[in-house]
Image (cartoon, rainbow, N blue to C red):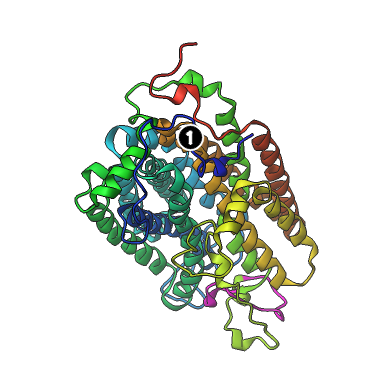
Amino acid sequence: MERAAGSAEAPHEAAPLLPRPPAPSSGPCSARCALALLAHGALLVAYALRAALSIAIIAITGGSPPSGNHITPGPRLPQAPVYNWSAETQGIVLSSFFYGYGLTQALGGYGAGLLGGKLVLGSGLLLSSALTLLVPRAAELGVGVLVGLQALLGLAQGVIFPAQYTLWAKWAPPLERSRLMNIADAGCTFGTFSALLVAGIICQSLGWPLVFYIFGGVGCAWCLCWFLFVYEDPASHPWISAGEREYIVSSLAHQGSSHGRSLPLGAMAKSLPVWAIAVACFCTDWLFYMLLTSMPTFMSNVLHFDLREGCFFLRTSGSGTSGAAASEPLAASLGAMEVRVPRSLLCRTGSFPPCPTLGTGWGTSWLGCWLISSWPGMLLPSVFLVVVPYIGSSSTAAVVLLTLALTIISMTGAGININHIDIAPRYAGFLLGVTNTFGIIAGIIAPTAVGLLVSQDLQEGWRNAFFVAAALNVFGLIFYVAFGSGTVQGWAREEPAAP
């Protein structure tokens, strides 16, 4: 079987008859690299917006899940209310984003194929940024209103990823596809960890409502850059060089034009490579979204991280698991130990050249390609999750393992996503929307399952949550290796062969 990500670097079967011109410079001054950086920023903002509540909920609930639903004044921030939500309620609030997120995946991919990826992606990001500004008011009105707002936020963000892949089907030459898309997708991981770094400090210093006001404002500002500097295809770009335009257009000539109003739904439904991607999306996204939405709570309640330090300082002498204790100034804790997650672990390491945001170091291209194109990318996070419950009091090791698991699984997701363009470039956006819906279903179930498991017993609940995620990930790996492919399918060509 051809590897998913590796096929992105190999010539396609239906290569153009005429020789392609040499590739012009692919450095930061090229139009396609500029698009990768702009998409990186858009995904950074999008993931920061969706991670904001996962981090701020520690301050919103006072760090502990007491019973009842009444509002009490915050112990350290009188202007920021504290809502006494149970663990189950917190799980429902965190998973409500995915109720809407799963509904617009396929619709976003289909709409991007008709209206253009630039418009659909930019509109989704702008709407989700505006809705983020309303989160504090929604929390004040009640859990039901907040759940509804999070579902609307998910509806808005659901179109972003499929629209991005519709754009890349027009912009990314096959020999550069993995590199460009990994630069863009690095925004997902960097956005999540940027939120981890910044949101805790904002909660402690300014109050948790400012997290949503600042993040939402930054998102609206970035949308202005998106609409001003992004173009739908090389032909419409006013500043692209003639050589680069010719190179991109000629390298993509074999894949055909974007899809029309009709789609080969029957052939898609019977395609094993499509199902391989769908199953892999469900299994890897279960692990990814479990860590994305629940890791801040685990770090606070189990590892006793200090919220004031952006979840990067660990108390080793505290005896309680309450948020009040976990958010005490580090200086007040005798014998406290400072733990800093290596900055190099915070970037998606599949990009080449090394991640432009965080520089060189651990993120080398060969390691990223090795991880996203072979079994270690899905197996290693499972191993890390199984080990975490057995490392005893070494919270430093737990942080490193969880960080590695989240980083590697997000890199693996990038390789799986590229596989959509490999097997069906004309329908890449729509297919990604369909298969990503399977991942969203996992995103809906995983936080709620964690909340239910943890509510029974803190230590045993987290251990079971890690084991379930690891087992699912191994199953997804086996299925993907058995049935995945990296070649363009017959039903995805401009003129499909007669049955």
Image quadrant occupied by the N terminus? top right
| Prevailing SS of the magenta stretch | loop
Total numbered labels: 1
The quarter of the picture where residue 331 lies is bottom right
* Res 311 visible: no
Q: Amino acid at mark 1?
A: His
Residue 133 placement, left or right of 187: left
* Res 218 visible: yes
Q: Measuring from the top left, give residue 414's x and y in whole percent.
A: 52, 48
Q: Which residues are magenta?
A: 306-322
Q: Residue at x 46, y 31 (%)?
A: 424
Q: Say if the magenta span includes residue 310.
A: yes
Q: Residue furthest top?
A: 499
Q: Measuring from the top left, give residue 274's x and y in whole percent.
A: 55, 30
Relative to 277, is 230 above or below? Answer: below
**Residue corresponding to mark 1:** 12
Please state which of residues 283 and 336 is positioned toward the viewer in this rendering: 283
Relative to 173, is 110 above or below? Answer: above
Q: Residue furthest left?
A: 238
Residue 419 placement, left or right of 389: left
Q: Measuring from the top left, give residue 477's x and y in whole percent.
A: 68, 41
Q: Residue at x 67, y 84 (%)?
A: 336
